[in-house]
Image (cartoon, rainbow, N blue to C red):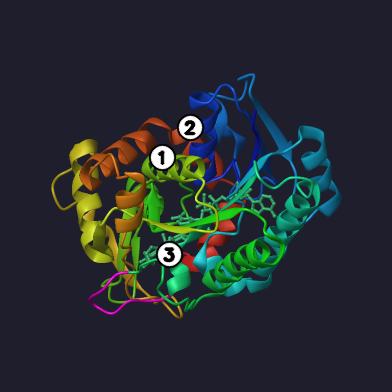
């Protein structure tokens, strides 16, 4: 019997992980623990929220008594920890929010696990979900492996690196059983439109400028979110305590090439003349401290656990665009209210 707390389950990746676990493992009890910040949205889980093995708890991981209550009330056996402040641009404006949730919040969860599992660690697991950004920036060649030294460059990546260190420290010091995975950029349904791909889709739909930072030659390594969820499932069940796995799909794209591909696909789907969306591309002020290139070496997870991505980038992007075109109500909900203020501040009313 497993009672698994998934933190951040109302967010982008978390909602896909919750859905996968709730539907694939009816014998597990899944507790979605989420504070519902601007990035958390229960609409993401409307299709599964009445399943008997699913429970939602609106709890902030900074609230120690509430986290403690959840551990006790549900006799928690495992944690899959995704809750975080996740957007690099926001971390540049409000770094402390990232220190609180990503560092302090993670330590609160570690303390709760250590305290409540003290009798017997053997059938427990603290699975921490992290990012490739902890490794810093690559030059034009090479890959991040599990042994690449940490070199975070943004307040976001520094806070995630710090949380990874705390998780490993609890493993060394208190023998808390943990695993960590570091994944590359995700894309797919339910992605909040402050991030590049959904922001572009939303702006193309509303015929707004497509902001490309700097020279557009920054490189990211993209993975479909449902493939990240299956990787998390695989790593969780392999239970290789104390290990780290990099997750990625060997799928590097320069931002400008990705933007042009997306424009082409959107024009086809919307029945636009070729070139219509590309005409919206606008080069804007660069992100401070912008990491030039990320690229994950995902050999270890493939070799040791047999995991690999299930879709090509073209398939994944096409499914993603279709999802946004078919879920414009979702898009309207998340872009009303505070999103407008964020957008105007970031993009100077463009
Ligand atoms: P997201 O911003 O879409 O969702 C974060 C979720 O965490 C939201 O539901 C939010 O309400 C919740 N949350 C935030 N602060 C909280 C708090 N104090 N207490 C409880 N809940 C809180 O993030 P995402 O893109 O889904 O990322 C999930 C995790 O995966 C993060 O840890 C992130 O660092 C990591 N990650 C993301 C990517 C990516 O490309 N998005 C890639 C690699 C790793
Ligand atoms: O690498 C994993 C990380 O990927 C995760 O840990 C983060 O949570 C996630 O947000 C993502 O970080 P990035 O900063 O890479 O993603 P973002 O979508 O913000 O930006 C992708 C690239 O596009 C980056 O080079 C910046 C650029 N960009 C972004 C935005 C929002 C633009 O050119 N214009 C934009 O408007």
State which quarter of the image contains the N terminus: top right
Residue 251: image location, x then y, percent: 25, 56
Q: Is residue 49 above or below residue 132?
A: above
Q: Residue at x 68, y 63 (%)?
A: 170
Q: Residue at x 48, y 32 (%)?
A: 20
1 or 3: tag closer to the N-terminus: 3
State which quarter of the image contains the C terminus: bottom left
1 and 2 marks in contact (CB < 8 Å) = yes
Q: Which mark is residue 230?
A: 1
2 and 3 marks in contact (CB < 8 Å) = no
Q: Is residue 84 above or below residue 319?
A: below
Give the residue number, with chain letter if any, for mark 3.
Answer: 132
Near-viewer residue (189 or 244): 244
Residue 190: image location, x then y, percent: 46, 41
- Distance between the Cα atoms at labels 1 and 3? 18 Å
Give the residue number, with chain letter if any, for mark 2.
Answer: 20
Q: Is mark 3 within 8 Å of ligand 2?
A: yes
Residue 26: image location, x then y, percent: 56, 21
Q: Is residue 349 above or below residue 60?
A: below
Is residue 177 visible in the rendered image? The answer is yes
**Range covered by the magenta-colored residues:** 136-143
Check disc 2: other Cα within 10 Å, few if <14, some if 14-19, many if 20+: some
Q: Residue at x 24, y 44 (%)?
A: 266
Secondary structure, mark 1, is: helix
Secondary structure, mark 2, is: helix
């Amino acid at each position: 019997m497993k009672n698994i707390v998934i933190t951040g389950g109302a967010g982008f990746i978390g909602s896909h992980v919750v859905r996968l676990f709730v539907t694939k493992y009816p014998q597990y009890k899944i507790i979605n623990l989420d504070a519902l910040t601007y990035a958390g949205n229960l609409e993401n889980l409307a299709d599964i929220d009445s399943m008997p093995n699913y429970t939602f708890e609106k709890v902030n991981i900074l609230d120690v008594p509430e986290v403690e209550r959840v551990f006790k009330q549900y006799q928690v056996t495992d944690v899959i920890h995704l809750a975080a402040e996740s957007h690099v641009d926001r971390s540049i404006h409000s770094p402390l929010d990232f220190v609180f949730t990503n560092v302090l919040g993670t330590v609160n969860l570690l303390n709760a696990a250590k305290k409540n599992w003290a009798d017997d660690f053997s059938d427990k697991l603290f699975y921490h979900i992290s990012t490739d950004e902890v490794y810093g920036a690559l030059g034009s060649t090479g890959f991040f492996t599990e042994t690449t030294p940490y070199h975070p460059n943004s307040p976001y990546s520094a806070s995630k690196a710090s949380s990874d260190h705390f998780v490993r420290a609890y493993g060394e010091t208190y023998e808390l059983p943990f695993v960590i995975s570091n994944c590359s950029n995700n894309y797919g349904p339910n992605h909040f439109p402050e991030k590049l791909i959904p922001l572009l889709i939303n702006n193309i739909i509303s015929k707004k400028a497509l902001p490309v930072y700097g020279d557009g030659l920054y490189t990211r390594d993209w993975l479909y979110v449902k493939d990240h969820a299956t990787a998390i499932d695989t790593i969780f069940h392999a239970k290789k305590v104390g290990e780290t796995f990099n997750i990625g799909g060997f799928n590097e794209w320069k931002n400008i090439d990705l933007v042009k591909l997306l424009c082409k696909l959107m024009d086809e789907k919307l029945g636009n003349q070729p070139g219509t969306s590309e005409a919206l591309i606008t080069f804007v002020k660069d992100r401070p401290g912008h990491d030039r290139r990320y690229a994950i070496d995902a050999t270890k997870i493939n070799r040791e656990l047999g995991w690999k991505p299930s879709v090509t980038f073209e398939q994944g992007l096409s499914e993603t665009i279709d999802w946004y075109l078919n879920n414009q109500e979702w898009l309207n909900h998340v872009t009303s209210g505070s999103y407008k203020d964020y957008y105007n501040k970031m993009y100077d009313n463009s």
